Image (cartoon, rainbow, N blue to C red):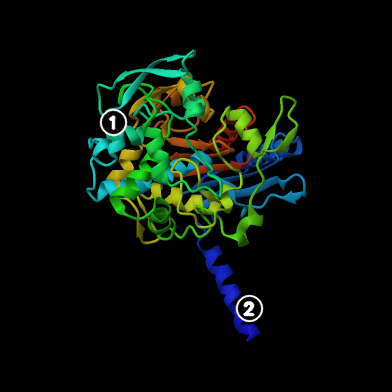
């Protein structure tokens, strides 16, 4: 009997391992030994100097893993060493997964990009536009919107729907509305429907389609999926994305046997001193008092998923997801999207100026383009970069980021858990990675 149990455990372990992308020889994949040594030295130094508690770097080219290494500590208090299989709070790197989920329904003909959002979610009819804020009466000053929110606005952050903590004009009113934007508490009775109805009561920060503003669009898209499909958004992700792609350690609500595999999240003061990122730290940094919890991941297999923030995962699972995109929508026999839909994701559509992208940590760069749930490097921006024009990326609030370069058939991931993050750490990693391409 013991032998049977041991065999079963071994098969489970092997099955989990076998889902990872295959490893390849970096030299045969066109990456130089010297270039990767520079990546190593940079990553090790950042942990040794305690700039970053712990991190994982990963490079995949031509469908094979050329580089995957962990550095530093996953938990400074216990001294736990970072491993490449640690789990991370993906925060806004959830958005690309939500975008792909929404595009599956787009492919099925359940809406077009010109479908008015109000025909799916009636609460978004008769929206108001913010024009001012009365600080004495604590009231928004608004006018009726001239344009309707269309589905393409939701996919591209051009709807005018705000993220309350990142608003400027009317910030007091947005914050006082108490809308849950991420990381819901485990004892919450809220549903995604409740959250989106509350969101729809707030004014838009600009006319739909007339500008780009980082906002709760992917949370709205999650609710669109629930209404059109009938399943909860969380179950849709599990059944339509995670399971077919064999992302066996990607969660909306982490199972108890995985709780100890979470990498700890830290914050730092101006001197660089690190401390655990708690609920109170989050409220202070975001200036936001709505109920949010860093323990949201313990909501095991929850039915409430926030489309912009709530996935917990690891580098190997996310690598499978991004390889699917590089493969134009398929991986290991699973067809997630069509080739033409993936091409649509990658098109540079709208200008994103530096001040629009502050929340995404892209300060210091003049301008990117927005694609469908991604940032795209336009030709002008890529002129003095090693990364190719047309490459696209996104990042998460706690220090995860990806870059996908179709021309080089390559993507890279950097995972750590520190907010606010050190200036330019991610960009230095990316610069060294692309500088390692030899052929």
Task: Say whether residue 32 is left or right of residue 191.
Answer: right
Q: Nearer the viewer, residue 72 or 406?
A: 72
Residue situated in front as seen by the camera: 392 or 133? 133
Q: Which mark is residue 73?
A: none
At label 2, counting other C-alpha atoms closer than 10 Å, the crowd grade (few under 14, some 14-19, many 20 or more) is few
State the residue in front, 346 or 303. 303
Mark toward the viewer: 1 or 2? 1
The label shown at residue 149 is: 1
Disc 2 designates what residue?
6
* Residue situated furthest front in the rendering: 137
Residue at 43% over, 31% down: 215
Q: Is residue 113 left or right of residue 389?
A: left
Q: Position of residue 370 (x, y in %)?
A: 38, 30
Name above or below for residue 260 compared with residue 208.
below
Contact between marks 1 and 2 (CB within 8 A): the answer is no
- The answer to which of 359 and 46 lies nearer the viewer is 359
Disc on the earlier residue, 1 or 2 = 2
Q: Position of residue 195 (x, y in %)?
A: 43, 40
What is the CA distance from the residue labelled 1 to the residue labelled 2? 56 Å
Horizontal placement of 266 versus 190: left or right?
A: right
* Helix, strand or loop status at disc 2: helix
Residue drawn 71% across the image and 28% down it? 269
Q: Is residue 311 visible?
A: yes
Image x and y of residue 225, in percent:
33, 48
| Circle 1 crowding by C-alpha within 10 Å: few under 14, some 14–19, many from 20 | many
What is the residue that sits farthest to the bottom in this orientation? Answer: 1
Quarter of the image containing the N terminus? bottom right
Residue 385 makes an appearance in the image: no
Residue 95 placement: quadrant? top left
Residue 289, compared with residue 26, is above or below; it is above
Across and down, in percent, residue 293 comes to: 59, 43
Question: What residue is shown at x 74% (from left), y 51% (from top)?
Answer: 80
């Amino acid at each position: 009997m013991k032998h049977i149990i041991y065999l079963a455990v071994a098969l489970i372990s092997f099955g989990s391992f076998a889902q990872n992308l295959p490893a390849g020889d970096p030299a045969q994949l066109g990456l130089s030994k010297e270039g990767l040594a520079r990546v190593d030295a940079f990553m090790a130094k950042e942990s040794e100097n305690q700039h970053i508690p712990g991190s994982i770097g990963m490079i995949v080219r031509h469908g094979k893993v050329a580089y995957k290494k962990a550095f530093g500590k996953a938990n400074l208090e216990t001294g736990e060493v970072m491993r490449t299989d640690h789990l991370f709070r993906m925060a806004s790197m959830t958005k690309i997964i939500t975008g792909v989920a929404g595009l599956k329904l787009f492919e099925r003909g359940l809406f077009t990009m010109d479908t008015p959002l109000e025909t799916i979610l009636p609460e978004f009819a008769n929206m108001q536009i913010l024009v001012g804020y009365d600080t004495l009466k604590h009231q928004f000053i608004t006018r009726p919107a001239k344009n309707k929110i269309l589905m393409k606005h939701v996919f591209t952050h051009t709807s005018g729907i705000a993220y309350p903590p990142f608003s400027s004009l009317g910030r007091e009113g947005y914050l006082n509305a108490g809308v849950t934007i991420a990381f819901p508490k485990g004892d919450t009775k809220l549903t995604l429907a409740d959250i989106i109805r509350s969101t729809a009561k707030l004014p838009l920060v600009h006319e739909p389609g007339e500008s780009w503003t980082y906002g709760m669009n992917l949370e709205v898209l999650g609710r669109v999926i629930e209404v059109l499909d009938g399943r909860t958004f969380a179950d849709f992700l599990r059944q339509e994305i995670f399971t077919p792609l064999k992302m066996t350690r990607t969660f909306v609500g982490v199972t108890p046997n995985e709780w100890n595999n979470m990498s700890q999240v830290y914050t730092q003061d101006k001197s660089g001193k690190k401390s655990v990122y708690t609920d109170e730290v989050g409220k202070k940094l975001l200036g936001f008092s709505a109920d949010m919890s860093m323990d949201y991941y313990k909501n095991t297999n929850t039915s409430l998923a926030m489309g912009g923030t709530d996935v917990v995962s690891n580098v190997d699972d996310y690598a499978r997801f991004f390889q699917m995109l590089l493969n134009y929508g398929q991986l290991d026999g699973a067809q997630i999207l069509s080739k033409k839909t993936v091409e649509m994701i990658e098109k540079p559509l709208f200008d994103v100026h530096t001040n629009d992208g502050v929340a995404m940590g892209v300060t210091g760069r003049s301008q990117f383009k927005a694609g469908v749930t991604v940032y795209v490097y336009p030709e002008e921006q890529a002129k003095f970069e090693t990364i190719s024009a047309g490459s696209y990326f996104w990042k998460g609030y706690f220090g995860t980021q990806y870059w996908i370069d179709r021309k080089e058939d390559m993507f890279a991931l950097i995972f750590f858990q520190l907010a606010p993050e050190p200036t330019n750490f991610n960009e230095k990693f990316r610069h060294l990675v692309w500088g390692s391409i030899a052929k």
